Image: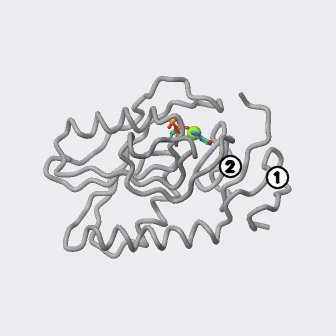
Amino acid sequence: MSDAGSTSSLPDVGKILISHEQIQARITELGATITEEHAGRSPLLICVLKGAFVFMSDLSRAIDLPVEFDFMAVSSYGSATKSSGVVRIVKDLDLDLSGRDVILVEDIIDSGLTLSYLRKNLLARNPASLEVVSLLARETTDLEELEVRHVGFRIPDEFVIGYGLDVAERYRNLPYIAIYTGDAE
Ligand SMILES: O=P(O)(O)OC[C@H]1O[C@H](OP(=O)(O)OP(=O)(O)O)[C@H](O)[C@@H]1O
Ligand code: HPA
Ligand SMILES: [Mg+2]
């Protein structure tokens, strides 16, 4: 049912691009790399809500360090499958970033608008370091330009849902990443 390449019986859920098992295996690798790179430190993980909450939960448990957590909610897609072009902060952080090693945790880098906005916003708070880990990024995204350190999977130009990613708030609970086949625009 969750095998890559197969389909779901749920409406608007198309081909499964990345299975639950593939996601978990990649998260184990990402967690080990982050653990190694931050050995001896206590990075602050910032989850970009809502989409990144599932990835953050699994990734944090694959990191063997005394990490701390904070959460920021930003929104630009609303119920559409195209960015509105305006990134709105819905909830700000609770913690002070000055002097902290910050790891920003995203679910997807699509147009890159959200990340560009967040990078500027967070750097203005004087962290000691800021790095970005995203579960997904479009094949067309220039990761060097956006300074993204770790990416789980590169994906083709299709709107995807599941594992935190939504369309109009639905399907975040799918345990895999699938192509959205509904008619939201
Ligand atoms: O690179 P971009 O084109 O900016 O797209 C990526 C962002 O868009 C989505 O957030 P969304 O606005 O849907 O909010 P949500 O996480 O609450 O669903 C996603 O979770 C990323 O944060
Ligand atoms: O492909 C996507 N799916 C869900 N949310 C998104 N936000 C940006 N791109 C996407
Ligand atoms: Mg969304």
Is tag 2's residue or tag 1's residue first in the polypeptide sequence? Answer: 1
Query: Badges 2 and 1: C-beta atoms under 8 Å apart?
Result: yes
Image position, residue 133 (x, y; %): 41, 55
Image position, residue 39 (x, y; %): 24, 73
Residue at 51% from the left image edge and 50% from the top image edge: 107
Determine if the C-beta at disc 2 is less than 8 A from ligand 2: no
Residue at 35% from the left image edge and 67% from the top image edge: 34
Above or below: residue 112 compared with residue 57: above
Residue tagged 1: 10
Q: Report the side of 87 relative to 166 (left or right).
A: left
Q: How many marks?
A: 2
- In three-dimensional space, the C-alpha distance between marks 2 and 1, rounded to whole angstroms, equals 10 Å
Helix, strand or loop for disc 1: loop
- Ligand 2 shows up in the quarter that is top right
Helix, strand or loop for disc 2: loop
Residue at 50% from the left image edge and 68% from the top image edge: 27
Disc number for residue 171:
2
Neighbor class of circle 2 (other Cα within 10 Å; few <14, some 14-19, many 20+) is: many
Q: Amino acid at mark 1?
A: Leu
Residue furthest top in the image: 85
Q: Report the side of 150 relative to 152 (left or right).
A: left
Q: Report the side of 77 relative to 132 (left or right).
A: right
Q: Amino acid at mark 2?
A: Tyr
Disc number for residue 180:
none
